[in-house]
Image (tube, rainbow, N blue to C red):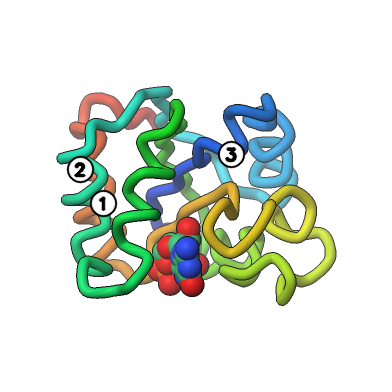
């Protein structure tokens, strides 16, 4: 299996409830390494650009409002098969459908305030990582 890097975001509902450490522990316990991490407040423009792929969806406006409602923690996670592995640890988008032990089952509030984001492909991961980090920010 290939060593991959993926972009993770700990979302405002989770930073608000002081869950960064608990979520990071789930990632690290599962074998992922946090090789870059930055706590920031997204601007509306950044959130709209990041979620551009969803701009035609009915919930786009709400999603952007939520993502700028508080700080987020952007991270690069590294490990074997990290993209799929991370999405498995995150759990289903809607926490009602997430498996026990996943971040979203444990911590998410609802389908929108679902605590974490993770890239969904090699191409998306590369694009999303460069949205937040330069090569020099990532220390493996
Ligand atoms: P993900 O890859 O599991 O994060 O899911 P998607 O790419 O489909 O959706 C992106 C984000 O939009 C999700 O993580 C949620 O925060 C939000 N979202 C997805 N579906 C809905 C929905 O039906 N309603 C609302 N309000 N937000 C949603």
In this picture, residue 1 sits left or right of residue 126: right
Mark 3 lies on residue: 13
Q: Residue at x 20, y 55 (%)?
A: 127
Which one is closest to the eye, mark 3 or mark 2? 3
Callout 1 touching callout 2 (CB < 8 Å): yes
Q: Position of residue 50 (x, y in %)?
A: 23, 51
Would you place residue 12 above or below residue 95 in this image? Answer: above
Image quarter where the C terminus lies is: top left
Q: Residue at x 43, y 37 (%)?
A: 75
Q: Position of residue 136 (x, y in %)?
A: 22, 25
- Residue 45 in sight from this viewpoint: yes
Q: What label sits on residue 128 in the rendered view?
A: 1
Q: What label sits on residue 19 in the rendered view?
A: none
Q: Residue at x 38, y 61 (%)?
A: 119
Mark 2 lies on residue: 131
Which one is closest to the eye, mark 1 or mark 3? 3
- Please, what secondary structure does the residue beneath circle 3 have? helix
Please identify the quarter of the rendering in which residue 45 is found: top left
Give me the C-alpha separation between circle 3 and circle 2.
Answer: 21 Å
Question: Which of the two residues, 66 or 98, is positioned nearer the viewer here?
Answer: 66
Please identify the quarter of the rendering in which residue 39 is found: top left
Question: Which of the two residues, 72 or 132, is positioned nearer the viewer here?
Answer: 72
């Amino acid at each position: 299996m290939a060593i991959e890097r993926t972009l993770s975001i700990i979302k405002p509902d989770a930073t608000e409830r002081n869950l960064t450490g608990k979520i990071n522990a789930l990632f690290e316990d599962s074998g992922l390494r946090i090789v870059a991490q930055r706590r920031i407040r997204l601007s509306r423009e950044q959130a709209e650009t990041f979620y551009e792929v969803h701009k035609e969806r009915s919930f786009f406006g709400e999603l952007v409002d939520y993502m700028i409602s508080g700080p987020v923690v952007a991270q690069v996670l590294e490990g074997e098969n990290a993209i799929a592995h991370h999405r498995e640890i995150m759990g289903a988008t809607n926490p009602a459908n997430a498996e026990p032990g996943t971040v979203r089952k444990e911590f998410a509030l609802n389908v929108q305030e679902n605590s974490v984001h993770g890239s969904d492909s090699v191409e998306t991961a590369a694009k999303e990582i460069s949205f937040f980090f330069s090569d020099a920010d990532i220390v493996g």
